Amino acid sequence: MNPSIAINQQFIDGYLSKTINQSTVFPIGQNLAYAPSEITPTKLGTFTAAFYNQDPNVFSNNLDTTLTQLSTLIYWELTGDSAMLRFGWSSNDLLLDFPTTSKIELTLAGYNPSSLKWELIPSFLDSISLFNTISDLYSGSFSTIDTLKLANYSAFSIAKKSPCEAAVTPVLDLNQPILPGMQLSEIVFSNGFNVWYETPEDAFQQENALDNSSVLVDNTTYYIVNQESDCPSEILEILISNSTNSITPISSNLKLKIYPNPSSNGIFTLQLDFDLKDGDIIVKDLSGRSIDYRHTSLKDKIQIELQEAPGIYILEVNVNDQFYRQKLVVK
């Protein structure tokens, strides 16, 4: 069955077993929630899958330190040998569980019966989901990064990751010849697993990533994120310029702290390590619309008050061609 055209009446409410030797979608769900799983085995074997539109805390509410919150509405049970996995959802359950959480803060989690804890499973949110749509909290899918031994886990669910130290910002070898028309795969970095995006909004949300076969376009700015860890790096902006046959980094040189973040009332304090001259402060929503702009003298502390709905916003600070970009979360 093609998951992109499956409807609620077509899924299996219960356990579904198949003997497979290639990537196969298991059309499973419960109640009115269709939540298929895709299993890519390492060898021929029999696999069983089921989805529950229920609280996974029936296993345990103990979380590993890498997690802060577990879904209370969805989980999957899978049995079999080793495989790569994808898990999809098509209801508003994650919106109910994580109403003010960015989707990039979520991860797959697995219940380990040996440790009696839910543990983070290295995974990524699919740009294009099992339903052939862009993944979001209403409908989407996660994929595991590595092959998993299913015997190590009793169940799988979605969880919120603990705050952690961001990966190192991508570092380019500026001596390499970089020209419009080159493929992204030809660009050399000295660190990390670096992913390219066309807009800063896509880079923040880690969606619509460019394929490595994409070619560089003259006079175009790209946005690169090091995603080698569970906490992505700050964004590196680079401008492709045919006139100089090189890439000019537009780096995040400003040292700035923001607190509280998330904010429960929309009030944030920006604290600089030192005073700077006049600069621009811009706050945008994820569509790119500016909701706050000021040209001001950047002193030690600056307060921003957002009278906006709960959600994620983008802060940009620009001083003498030095840029800082960070997300603001209003609970």
Image (cartoon, rainbow, N blue to C red):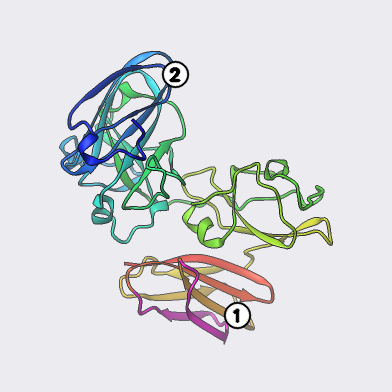
Q: Secondary structure at mark 2?
A: loop
Residue that appears at 18% across and 44% down? 32
Q: Is residue 94 left or right of residue 82?
A: left
Distance, label 2 to label 1, CA atoms, is 57 Å
Residue 275: assigned label: 1
Q: Amino acid at mark 1?
A: Asp
Q: Secondary structure at mark 1?
A: loop
- Assign the N terminus to one quadrant of the image: top left
x%, y% of residue 194? 60, 46
Residue 305 in the magenta stretch? The answer is yes
x%, y% of residue 79? 28, 22
- Assign the C terminus to one quadrant of the image: bottom left
Q: Is residue 189 left or right of residue 296?
A: right
x%, y% of residue 161? 37, 48
Q: Quadrant of residue 48?
A: top left
Q: Quadrant of residue 13?
A: top left
Residue that appears at 41% across and 75% down? 268
Give the magenta range. Answer: 287-308
